[in-house]
Structures are given as structure tokens and as C-alpha cells.
Amino acid sequence: MTTTQVNPYEDVKPIKPWQITIKDVIADLISVVIVTIATFVTLAVTPMRGKLGFMGALFFYSIIATIVRGFINKKPKSIGSSLSSLFIYIAAGIVVAPVMSILYTIVVRGVKGLSLGIFKHDMGVAVPDSPLNEGGLLHALIGTVEIVTFSTIICVPIALLTALYLTEIRGRFSGLVRFLVQAMSGVPSIIAGLFIYAVVLIQFHGRYSGIAGALALSILMLPTVARVAEEVLKLIPDDLREAGLALGATQWRTVSRIVIPTAKSGLITAVILGVARIAGETAPIILTIGGSDRINWNLFSGQMSALPFYVWRQYLYGGETATARAWTGILVLMLIVMFFFTVTRLLSRRGSRV
């Protein structure tokens, strides 16, 4: 004779107190509607005006609504948690709102002068007050690509070797080198421009050129690439290094055949972050490249232009058309920087999956 054991907990369903119910959604919607109405009524009947008054009233009534909901639901202990969540959302909104406002302003004002023609022509036969369908920023775009590319060629080997020295060699000067790299991270961009201007253009009787701008930007790019590359190399397990040495490989061969290939995606991310860091720098460019309204393919001779310089010059001219050209240049520059940051995120996610 067999007996069947009955599980007394078979029909018991797990409780999920954190799950959002329809009742909670309806209560939230009612709270939002009441808070919004109270905010607009307050702005209408009181001297409070503008965005600051709106945010202040909204913040005040949101706190009141959170406290009232806690007492209505008979959960006074949850008021503290709700208020903490409210403060977190408000803090996030304070951070995100200015960024979204800047992006919105750039897109709205910059799209007016955006067309395919601006990528085909320079300003050689046009003036800032010419119609937007005349001239373009091709010369500035080409100058930016040349200057940033040469800055990367100068900076990346030095930055990667610096990171390898700090993580693999760890010599007696590693502390001093790390201190200098960190100190360079806080150097204002105009200092780099003034340094190249004083040394190259004055001391060695140089002239405005793209190479001078590339040297200035490489100074700014170096600490970013070096620090990020150092952190990436630190993530490589020491077991890989020890395995290479145990197989009889030299330290250099271990680094070149094991460490660097393993950290390849992270090192590429460091380089892209460095490029995004210098793509929009204005002060060193103004002091070193001189500016030009025509395309200059020679990086070592003659004045050049770049997108930051183009925006600065168009803004100085003033006028409605010139200002519209400046906003268009800002929009193009922002899209380039956003492209680099997007590629960086994609590569970092790919590296984390690997």
C-alpha cells in the first residue's frame, strides 16, 4: 500500500510586494495630474514666473503628494523611501534637463543651414553674409580630420608606451610619470596652445600651420589615452603574464603577444575617447592654425581651418546668416563627437562580452 504525500504549499502563490499593480498606476497618474494642475494654478495666481518658478512649485507639490499618498495607503514608513526616490528622480532631471536643452537648441538652430552643399564647398568664394546655399564648411571638415589624425599618430604610441611602463615595467620613475600624466589631465586647453605658440611659432620662428595645431592637441590627448589605457591594462589577469613567462617567453614578447591582444578592444576605446576629447577643442586651434577660408591639404605649410575655428570665426562676424553658419558648424561637430562616443560604447560592450 502506497501513500501519497500532499504538499500543503502547492496552491500557495508567491507574494510579490514589489510588483506594480493597476491600482498603483492609477494612483500615480492621479497624483501627476493633481500636481500638474496645482503647479499651473500656483503660477497663475502668484508672482512665481518662468522655468525656475515652475520647477520650484512642481518640486513642492510633488513632496506634498508623496507624503499624502503614504498616509492614505496607511504606510507611513514608506514615506521616507518614496521621498528618497523622488529626490533621486529630481536630481536626475536636474542633470538631464540642461543637456537635453543644449541638444535641442543646437539641433533646432543648426538644422536651418544644414544641407548637402555645405559638405561640397568651402568659403573661398563666399562671405559670411552670403546666402546659406553658398559656401560651406568642407575646408573646416578636412582640416579637422587632418589635424586630429596627425595628433593621433603623434599621441597614441607615446600614450600606450607610457601605459605599458606604468603597468608592466613599473620602474622607479613610475610614480613620477603617473603624477605627471594626472597633472596633464587638468591642464587648461589654452595652456597647450600657448605652449606650442611660444615654442614653435615664436622660439623657432614657425608659422601658422596644421602641424602646430596637431602638436597642441596631442598634448591634450596624451593624458586621456594614457590613463584609460593604464586602467585597461590593469584589468588583464596576472595569470596570463605568468603563463607567458613560464613558457619561456621574454617580458616584451609576453606583452606584445598576450597582454596587448587581450586588451585590444579596451585600447581602441582609449584612443577613440582621446579623439573625442580633442575634436572640439577651440583655444589651441585658434592660437596655432591661423585659419583659412579655402581647403589646404598640406598639413605642414600654410594656414588651415577646423570646425571649432570655423564656428568661432562665423560667430565673430555676427549677422543672422553668419550666426546660422556657426550653429550649423556646432551641429556637425556635435554629431562627430557623438559618433566617436557611440563607437566607444559599442566597443566597450563588445569587450565586456568577450
Image: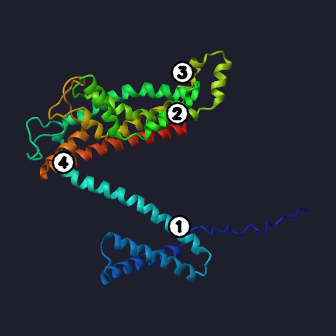
Compare marks 1 and 4 and give the one earlier in the sequence.
1
Left or right of 67? Residue 341 is: left
Mark 1 is on which residue type? Ser
Q: Which element type, helix, strand or loop, lies under badge 4?
A: helix
Q: Which element type, helix, strand or loop, lies under badge 3?
A: helix
Separation of disc 2 and disc 4 at Cα?
Answer: 39 Å
Name the residue beneath numbered marker 2.
Answer: 178
Left or right of 8? Residue 250 is: left
Q: Nearer the viewer, mark 1 or mark 4?
A: 4
> Which color mode does the image show?
rainbow
Name the residue beneath numbered marker 4.
Answer: 315
Name the residue beneath numbered marker 1.
Answer: 85
Q: Nearer the viewer, residue 27 or 338?
A: 338
Compare marks 2 and 4 and give the one earlier in the sequence.
2
Q: Residue at x 56, y 78 (%)?
A: 70
Q: Which element type, helix, strand or loop, lies under badge 1?
A: helix
Q: Residue at x 32, y 58 (%)?
A: 101
Q: Which element type, helix, strand or loop, lies under badge 2?
A: helix
Q: Nearer the viewer, residue 139 or 190?
A: 190
Separation of disc 2 and disc 3 at Cα?
Answer: 22 Å
Q: Position of residue 47 (x, y in %)?
A: 31, 80
Does residue 337 appear anywhere in the picture?
A: yes
Mark 2 surroundings: few (<14), some (14-19) or many (≥20) residues within 10 A: some
Does residue 29 appear anywhere in the picture?
A: no
Separation of disc 1 and disc 4 at Cα?
Answer: 43 Å
